[in-house]
Image: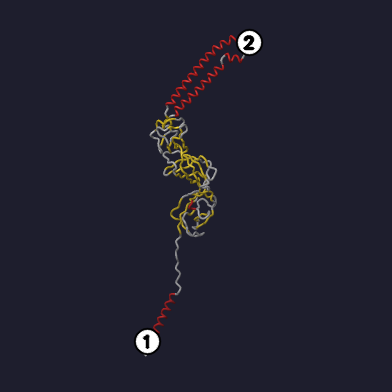
Amino acid sequence: MKRKRKGRWAALAITLAGCAVAALLAAMDEEAPDIAIDRPVLAVETIRVQKADYRIRVPAWGFVKPRETIDIRTQVSGRVDRVSAKVFTGARVNRGEFLFSIDVRDYRNALVEATAAYETARQALAIEEGRQTVARSEWKLLEQSPWAGERNKALALREPQRKACRADVQAALAKQSRAARDVERTRIASPCKGVILSETIAEGDVMDRGDVALRVACTERYQILAAFSPQYRLDPKARTAVIEIGTDRHDGVIKAVLPRIDPQTRQKQVLMAFAGQGVMLDAYASLTLPGPFFEDAVILPVEALRQGSSVWVLGADGTLVIREVTILARDLSHIVVGNGLMENDRVILTHIASPLQGMPLRQASLNRKG
């Protein structure tokens, strides 16, 4: 009997507990009052549209080469009797600086012989001219004779002999000049200021005429065959460009724009020339070439350009305005805008994750100038 009573009390307790839980859940299901959430308005940095003059800066790259590379060859044959201590690969030489010499003794002897032959020819001409003076006197006596004539007169006045002597003098003078040049050619000097790239010469070597003794890269002026993207075009009236090699900066001159695309890099090419001190050959160079020049145009930084050809503008009412614009040109840092913007428009530079036309915005404390 007692067990039955205990079971009834347990069932009653479970029922009451269930009712209490149901009442609590019903109270929690009552609709909660609306709570207003104050969302912050995004602050954006802008730049005011202002017109200005601007030249497109075309980026290019290339490697420094000497303007001239000269093979120094011997113009006379003979034994090398002296080589300068400055002749070695990598040495810097100045224009006219002595490099090496060929044994000159045989060439000096040849010059003495040629000089003597020239003097002998001159003396022979002087003697013949004296004989011609005598012949003129004799001809006056025979001028009225029946066999006188122009042909006989030339023979009587020894014109052929005089011409032969003059020819001998000219030939002897030519031999003397050639012998004198050969003497000069035994001493070889640097044809320019430059760097010795290679040398194959030593004292005692026997050189034939035309043998290559040294190769010199002239460093008075340099050149760069620079490559740039086909999307750019250069201003044909502008001839100067900026060349940067490491931390050094040089002014270069555009010599020519090649009329073809490089088949390997698929880039346009321009030949540059410049002068400098201590420039390393084959050094990498970055260039800024002159692109088209725009007067009184809208210039914006490239970060202002959005998807396609649109920009974001902060409207007068503080909302986002998405504008389509016409891009006339661009480089790595700026774009030139044709249509789509007005002066003093505030172009947004700040990135917006989910831009929506008309979304509220506010001006940040920073405001760049155009």
The amino acid at mark 2 is: Pro
**Where residue 156 sits: x, y (%)?**
58, 13
**Between residues 356 and 225, which one lies in front from this camera angle?**
225
Say if 177 sits above or below 127 in the image: below
Colouring style:
secondary structure
Q: Are marks 1 and 2 in contact (CB under 8 Å)?
A: no
Q: Earlier in the sequence, mark 1 or mark 2?
A: 1
Q: Residue furthest left?
A: 2
For the point 42% across and 42% down, the residue is 248
Q: Could you give the CA–CA distance between mark 1 and mark 2, rounded to whole angstroms?
A: 188 Å
> Counting other residues with Cα less than 10 Å from the Cα at mark 1, is it few (<14), some (14-19), or many (20 or more)?
few
**Where residue 310 sits: x, y (%)?**
52, 54
In the structure shown, which secondary structural element does the residue marked by tag 2 occupy? loop
The amino acid at mark 1 is: Lys
**Where residue 210 sits: x, y (%)?**
47, 33
Say if 237 sits above or below 171 in the image: below
The N terminus sits in image quarter: bottom left
In the structure shown, which secondary structural element does the residue marked by tag 1 occupy? helix
For the point 46% across and 32% down, the residue is 208
Residue designated by label 2: 146
Say if 319 sits above or below 211 in the image: below
Corner quadrant of residue 39: bottom left
State whether residue 302 appears in this view: yes
Q: Is residue 83 left or right of residue 144?
A: left
**Between residues 279 and 59, which one lies in front from this camera angle?**
279
Residue designated by label 1: 6
What number of labels is visible? 2
